[in-house]
Image (cartoon, coloured by chain):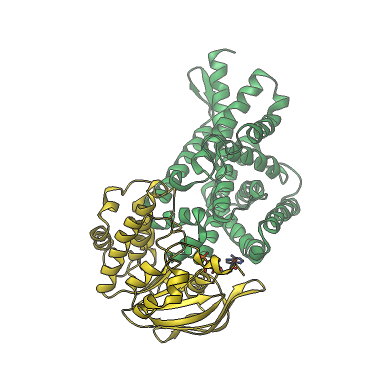
Amino acid sequence: MTFEQFLQYIFSGVTSGSVYALTAMGFTLVFNATQIINFSQGQLVMLGGMIAVGLYGAGAPLWGAFLGSVAIVVLVAVGFERIAIRPLLRKGILAQVIATVGASFVFETAAMLIWGRDAVTLPAFSGEEPLSVGGATVVPQTLWVVGLTIVIVVALQLFYRKSLFGKAVRACAVDATSARLQGISYSRVVIFSFALTGAISAAAGVMITPISFMGFHSGSLLGMKGFAAAMLGGLGNPVGAVLGGFILGIVEALGVGVVSAGYKDAIAFVILLLVLFVRPVGLLGAKMGNRG
Amino acid sequence: MLELRGVRAGYGRIEVLHGIDLTVGEGEILTIVGANGAGKSTLLKAVSGVVRISGGSITYDGERIDPLGVENIVSRRLIQIPEGRRLFGPMSVEENLQLGGYSRRGSGSPVAERLERVFALFPRLKERLSQQAGTLSGGEQQMLAVGRALMAEPRLLLLDEPSMGLAPIVVQDIFTGLRRLNQEGLTMVLVEQDARIALSLAHRGLVMERGRIVLEDSAQALLDNPEVRAIYFGRRNAGYRRGMEKT
Ligand SMILES: Nc1ncnc2c1ncn2[C@@H]1O[C@H](COP(=O)(O)OP(=O)(O)OP(=O)(O)O)[C@@H](O)[C@H]1O
Ligand SMILES: [Mg+2]
């Protein structure tokens, strides 16, 4: 492999890694608030992409389609929490996890009925003219994806570390009852976490659609990758989620280069199994707490 | 200030409190002693709304609070320090204190002023502001638990076994702090297994057995009561010697 090729794979790795990172972040936010693994996480990303394509097709400008999609997926995620998660609160976590599996089918079927079976795409945010970096080429959309991901991650970190409400959300992840005894509304924290997850997922979906197409069934693979990334970094640890996302993306891209493109999607699965066997708490360890 | 009438509560189908009556007057310290499983913690949880009551009523400042949610009870400055302290272990001392003031964000005295009051009481906390709460010593953790509660500027403070797991000398430090707070006007309900130290702080005491209040008297009278001395003094869990087990 030449250096230029290597660089090319890295660029491609950090691009998909960004999306895995944000998807993993979605898993993390919901898990920290509720201890639930949200099996419809990938479908939220898919909805983000599909809704943006729909809005763009209906004549909205690209930025309008982006923001509109974020707003709609936030509503979907909040509605999902209200309708399917909260009423099951007393039934235990298993019932809630099953509800998320059900939701993933609902989201997929709805997407298929609304937008059909074909994969769709969006124009890149700012042109398709590739740039040359160190002998490798980068499309501008890659810079958008990585740049926006960094902005989102940094903003989240500031929110969780500096704002009182962000600290309250972290406190709920540590000990929800004790948090309530400080006057923190746990149900508000849960709603907020679902809303934030919806926003981040939608953003990830919209950003990646110009690069890799989106179809009604894209969510399950994205969800699996995001889950592998979250597990790799340590489920419940937001910094780990981001790290896991980028590592997975880069390893996947290099795997394509060294082994074969045919194995690309198996890599996430192998990493997931390795984590479960070798280090179930992930690279940075589970719980968020002070790392949040 | 606080009044319970015929309070029943439990977990699922199991009733733990079988009709509790008690009152707490403004400015007093009421101590509740009882063996393991007597229902002391359940009683405090019922008052703070963590456990729903299935009968009776809880009135605070003339207002029924038993239908309210935990957050709304806390916002009335009725604050509980739960059993086992329940600090936010991975978060810093400072963040724990800030979260203690969550219910009075945007109201009450400025946060900096409240912090100074906590440091005046427990100077050790000031030196450890950026340390993870979970890495504090047991005594420091209890100071933080009290400090975190004070950040909410409580009018009524419920303490569930603040002496748990602490060396006697450390317990003295904590109780000295509590006495000072009471002298400044803070009303407290103090739950303890070891009656001696708890009653020495209190004005009045209750003895709880299997979900009922079996004895109520001034703290001094209870301290002199030979039966109380025999069962609840000294060794923790002494109640087991008389065959009192978890129900
Ligand atoms: N979450 C719960 N679910 C079911 N039963 C519970 C729960 N918490 C407490 N109990 C039961 O309620 C009874 C009273 O418990 P509680 O914790 O109120 O006792 P306590 O007087 O505080 O005891 P200790 O001195 O050991 O703290 C016990 O029989 C206990 O097993
Ligand atoms: Mg107890």
Q: Quadrant of ligand 1?
A: bottom right
Colour-to-chain, yellow? B
Residue A89 figure quarter:
bottom right
Residue B107 figure quarter:
bottom left
- Which residue lies at the image location 25% right of the left edge and 73% below the top edge? B183
Can residue A168 be seen at all in this image of the molecule?
yes
Residue B36 location, x and y as percent?
Answer: 53, 66
Q: Nearer the viewer, residue A76 or B134?
A: B134
Up/down of A198 relative to A187, above or below = above
- Which residue lies at the image location 65% right of the left edge and 71% below the top edge? B12
Residue A9 location, x and y as percent?
Answer: 58, 23
Residue B61 location, x and y as percent?
Answer: 39, 84
Q: Nearer the viewer, residue A13 or B75?
A: B75
Of the chain colours in the picture, the one used for chain A is: green
Give the quadrant of the N terminus of chain B. Answer: bottom left
Is residue B73 left or right of B180 when viewed as pictured? right
Q: Nearer the viewer, residue A87 or B53?
A: B53
Is residue A258 left or right of B20 when viewed as pictured? right
Total marks in image: 0
Is residue A170 left or right of A91 when viewed as pictured? left
Up/down of B61 relative to A229, above or below = below
Residue B19 location, x and y as percent?
Answer: 55, 83
- Which residue lies at the image location 71% right of the left edge and 30% below the top edge? A266
Q: Residue furthest top?
A: A2
Up/down of B153 relative to A60, above or below = below
Can residue A123 be seen at all in this image of the molecule?
no
